Image (cartoon, rainbow, N blue to C red):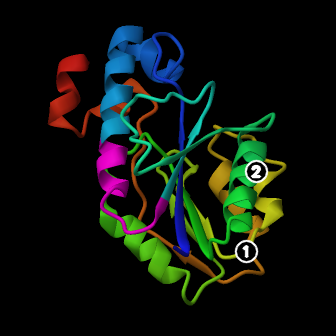
Amino acid sequence: MSNCILIFTRNPELGKVKSRLAKGIGQKNALTIYKKLLQHTKEVVSQIDCERWVGYSVAVRPNDIWPAADFKKFQQQGDDLGNRMEHAFTKAFAAGHQKVIIVGSDLYDLRPKHILEAFTALDTHDTVIGPAQDGGYYLLGMKTLIPQVFSNKEWGTATVFDATLADLKDKSLHKLEMLNDIDYAEDLKPYPEFMQYL
């Protein structure tokens, strides 16, 4: 199978996920919402006909929401997010995949159409990116490794998207629609099902 989706996940443990969100709604609620976001991400990517890899932040869990029959599990490797993403992309290309994308796991607005559009865009573009409202991105895809996008970034800040665009100025790029990722309590406000946690 020539297409591969990478999903990075933090092991869902109390006090170890969504720290910025937890400041607004408490650690227990933040963990509950993170689990809901992981479940949503799983349901979205499961609808895509491709190979799916899940990268764990701390330790690979054998029995969790990601069934081994549908998801290849691996341990993230690297000192920062850029290193970890580059390592995962490198492994996916080395495994023979022709199109590789990574998606965030904190997007309640993510739909299968966004991933399908990304894979289709790679037929005619070098790379594809989905901008997030906070200045980062929720999806990045490419057909060959572009190492510069993974270095010299202030990960987790509003500068990441623009800095990545600068790295890709010589590449043909397709932009997806902007989505809202959930990092802070106010990011929950558009979603009635999350209002109980505010």
From which residue to which does the magenta span run?
Answer: 40-51
Query: Is 6 above or below relative to 25?
Result: below
Residue appearing at x 36%, y 10% in the figure: 28
User: In front here: 18 or 72?
Assistant: 72
Q: Is residue 65 left or right of residue 2?
A: left
Q: Which residue is more in the foreground, 114 or 157?
A: 114
- Horizontal and vertical percent position of residue 6: 55, 53
Task: Please tell me which residue is depicted at 72% across the width and 57% down the height of the picture.
Answer: 91
Residue drawn at (32%, 20%), measured in percent from left and top? 32
Residue 149 x, y percent position in the rendering = 76, 59
Report helix, strand or loop for mark 2.
helix
Q: Position of residue 74 (x, y in %)?
A: 62, 41
Task: Name the amino acid type tagged 2.
Answer: His
Q: Which residue is mark 2?
A: 87
Total labels: the figure holds 2
Residue 46 falls within the magenta-colored stretch? yes
Please, what is the three-letter code of the amino acid marked with disc 1? Thr
Mark before the other along the chain sequence, 2 or 1: 2
Quarter-of-image position of residue 173:
bottom right
Query: Dot 1 corresponds to which residue?
Result: 144
